[in-house]
Image (tube, grey):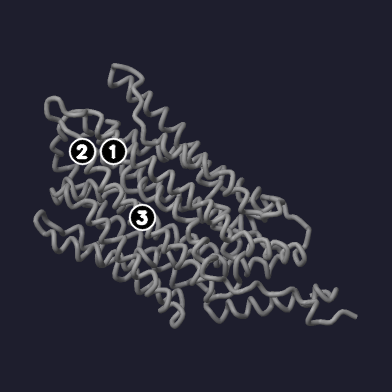
Amino acid sequence: MHDSASSVPPTLPKLSLPTKLAYGAGDLGPAITANILAFFLLFFFTNVAGINPGLAGSILLIGKIWDAVNDPFVGVLSDRTQNRMGRRLPWMLWGAIPFGIFYVLQWLVPQFSADPATNQWWLFGYYILVSVLFNTAYTAVNLPYTALTPELTQDYNERTSLNSFRFLFSIGGSIASLLLAQVIFAVFKPSTAPGGSCNAGVMQYTVLGIVCAVISIVSLYWCVWGVRRQVMVAENRRLETESTATIPLLEQLRIAFSNRPFLYVIGIYFCSWLAVQITASIIPYFVVNVMQREDQFIPVLLAVQGTALVMLFVWTEISKRVGKKAVYFMGMGVWIIAQAGLYFLKPGQIGLMYVLAVMAGFGVATAYLIPWSMVPDVVELDELQTGQRREGIFYSFMVLLQKVGLALGLFLLGQGLAIAGFKETVPCQPAPVQPPSAIAAIQLAIGPLPTLVLLIGLVLAYFYPITKEVHAEILLKLQERKRLQAQGEEP
């Protein structure tokens, strides 16, 4: 007979600080690129490339339609990958450089025709193509990365800690990207004076794109190198204990969407991320056109992201005591007050604008931290019910929703601005004066719209069923099943 103690698969070793740091670095590149895209891309299209806001919003929507296909596809392929480095790391290793290249291409403004109307449609096609290529590369590196969390540790509190390191780099990268933007924009400042550089506006974004791409590639390789040993241990453990039976893709999707806690998680995350993206996309227009202080744009963003970075660790500690759901309610409550308050701001109320920005940072931190720390709990509930671990399926839909939230936010804003009569900037000309209808649309997008979305997210969070105690029970049942399987008994 086998000794029962030796037959039970060993638990994963505790994560070291270098491993946690390396894991966190894996989200630095995607966070930097996503942050710059969220804050600047729509503004870049309308105010630098000179594209109509309706077309500009459509570019992002069309690009994300492709994500509806490639995210689940990559998720399944990632689950089925067989490599000595595990299922996830090869994707990150080979996808990093294409990810950086396609990101840079998004910030170029090619000249296809001397006729502005014809050139705009050529640019429309160019940005759609580049968007599809970039989103494919983004999925190839980011989706396998997000699926690493439950493979690195099964400890409830250690997962929250691991996600805090992830979002340390995520929010820290977002802050760094804004500081880089501020420096680069100051160096390559555009000028409409006679003899001034008409291409300086394009150069700002091109240089920013190159710098961010290099940082992204290096950080992804840091992650692969730093977590590879822990991942290989986890992969060997999985191969020893997991059933070899496979479930068809459509059946896997059915199982994922019949998992009631998962539906709550994706609903919570979608609402949180959609509010983040709507706010991030409209802030440039709000600060420039409503508050009439273009010089305050990046400092306001830094106030939000800096507060979120600090609160990330505060919320992590509070979560250990009161649970994830309670923390989400606390952060969202403060954020909703701040978001609603932005609607009533008037030009000149700069101090109050910063107060509201700091308050918003409290909620943004929970939007990053809590939904992602809920997903591994859902994965283990699915494993208990089906006998298989399919992180790729669940994480693919989380990443998909992140992208759909960005696309939907940008598309709605683009169409709304176009309907409201927003005037795009003609390259090398002074910015036009916006009509009152466009100003009203910007105010609606900064206040009431994201406030409503956040309230819906709070309702969903109230009904989320997996508490700390329920998760502990799930783990106990899984451990008992694996013990019996190791002894050759039926669970």
Give the structural element (helix, strand or loop) at label 3.
helix
**Which residue is depicted at the point 29% across and 34% down?**
203
| Circle 3 crowding by C-alpha within 10 Å: few under 14, some 14–19, many from 20 | many
Label of residue 22 in the image: none
- Give the percent coordinates (x, y) of residue 12: 65, 72
Is 172 on the left-hand or right-hand side of 242? left
Q: Is residue 313 visible?
A: yes
> In the image, 491: left or right of 175?
right
Task: Pick whichever, 66 or 482, lies toward us.
Answer: 482
Residue identifier under label 2: 189
Residue bearing the label numbered 3: 174
Name the residue nearer the viewer: 304 or 195: 195
Q: Earlier in the sequence, mark 2 or mark 3?
A: 3
Question: Which residue bears the numbered disc 1?
Answer: 204
Is disc 1 placed on a helix, strand or loop?
Answer: helix
**Residue at the spot x=56%, y=57% of the render?**
395
Q: Decide which of tag 2 and tag 1 comes sooner along the chain.
A: 2
- Whole-number angstrom distance, CA of label 2 to CA of label 3: 22 Å
